[in-house]
Image (cartoon, grey):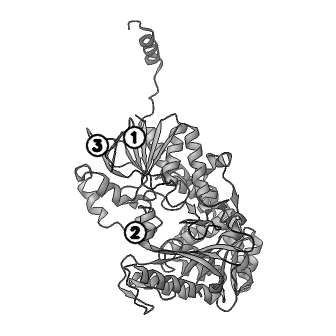
Amino acid sequence: MPDAVVIGAGPNGLVAANLLADAGWSVRVVEEQPEPGGAVRHDRGVHPDFVNDLFSSFYPLAAASPILSALHLEDHGLRWSHAPHVLAHPLGDGRCAVLDRRVATTAESVEAFAPGDGAAWHRLVDTWQHLRPDLLDALFTPFPPVRATARLAVRLRAAGGLRMARSLILPVRRLGEEEFSGEGGPLLLAGNALHADLAPESAGSGGFGWLMTMLGQTYGFPVPVGGSGALTEALVRRLRARGGELTCGQRVVEVAVRGGRAVGVRTADGEAVAARRAVLADVAVPVLYRDLLDARHVPAQMLSDLGRFQWDFATFKVDWALDGPVPWRAEQAHRAGTVHLADGLDELTRFAAQIAMRQLPDRPFALFGQMTLADPTRSPVGTESAWAYTHVPHDIRADAGDEGITGAWDATDRERMADRVERQVEHFAPGFRSRIRARRVLAPPTLQALDDNLVDGAINGGTTAMHQQLVFRPVPGTGRPETPVPGLFLASAGAHPGGGVHGAPGANAARAALRGHRVPVLNRAQRVLARRDRTGRRH
């Protein structure tokens, strides 16, 4: 019987398992899919000569994460690679905003949009460098991060106090207007805010866009050499080296509760896997509380609150094998690993508004990845392994493109939407479609079938909006990995601090489990008695 059972072998589940194994616990990880990794996997399913990431690709949060850094995954085969530029946001008129790990290069790019904006960029970076240590500490530690928050408050006062705090909760459109005169800086911030589900007018989108942009400025958007699954492989190798077990192809259907405490799990094939100390669940929040637990073990208020749980946007993705580099109109985009495709900030607002109205966007904002540029091992010399994803509504009521896409995501829907994404790429890279050797379409149901945590391809484990963060994540009054069932811990992106490949939810859950079984400190008299017991002497 293992000390702990971990449900799900996504990055959070594997981080949790590694930390428990480091503490001397025996651990078994049970994964539904035939391979581990969750949303961190790659394959050669588009073309045998091309490596394509199935889900996530670029990992600024992993590069910044002290949790992953402390695991020393480089000792287990992980290597990182970078594209020359971190990110580019071209416009239809040929101008292009560029994010580069060299601050001067980024500043020069936004200065080209308006005089003085380069200096404004330097000011944003200076503020980030001042706040970064304690901001990242607060982000990656369990809620509430008391000590990190106290230190951060001191730094915030030095950075302008309430004025700086106000900037972080601004909508990203307003933040861009206040900080810059031209379009370049606001485009970089707003595009990064829409890596989540934060529209340019959403409260807090300014802070999130600034955080993601500054992470790229400092750490880049690195990729694992060989494919995203190389990160998973390193986590698995490390776990097995410490005696941990991993079982794939087994779906957990129930968390077993006895005497009011989680004592193990039951799988779809009827196997009962007992846990001596804890069960950690790297699963979607509604799945844990509605499907894996009997309702009698979940407080009525929590079940009611789950009715208000909000997913982040659904996702539609296309993977390509290209015969040559993408023929971007803007020269700077040829050197960027990630390219944002929207013709201005107003188009980003229009895109987000259409999703809010449950319309399928007619001009989808696309995140485009040039993977061979970032990692030359991904495809033959002179070719490009590429992808693009865009967000769509979970419940599609109308097609703003008037092509009759219904949201059933049958073959017709999939092909029409993939063509629409390719037309968006063509707008910025004329001739793109002529370079396609093969493509693969991953519609929302396909993404969920490959990882059940990604409901309709929702990649953040729930909305990033302020009403479902901190003490409100996943539901009001939570914010920590502990659940209403003793011995059961939430280890997925549904827990604070949310989505992204950084390992914090898994680490927080593992630490909570360890705290629950910490050996108490004995005083001197108790130690004497304990020694007498071990030697058989009478008290």
Residue positioned most to the front: 48
Callout in the foreground (2, 3): 3
Q: Earlier in the sequence, mark 2 or mark 3?
A: 3
| Image spot of residue 388 (x, y percent) | 57, 76
Local packing at callout 3 (Cα closer than 10 Å; few below 14, some 14-19, many 20+) is some
Q: Are marks 2 and 3 in contact (CB under 8 Å)?
A: no
Amino acid type at image mark 1: Ala
Amino acid type at image mark 2: Trp
166 relative position to 308: left or right: right
Q: Are marks 1 and 2 in contact (CB under 8 Å)?
A: no
Residue drawn at the location 53% of the way across and 53% of the way down: 503
Local packing at callout 2 (Cα closer than 10 Å; few below 14, some 14-19, many 20+) is many
Look at mark 3 in the image and give the residue it sits on. Answer: 257
456 relative position to 138: left or right: left
| Residue 59 in sight | yes
Look at mark 1 in the image and give the residue it sits on. Answer: 278
Q: Is residue 457 above or below residue 538?
A: below
Amino acid type at image mark 3: Val
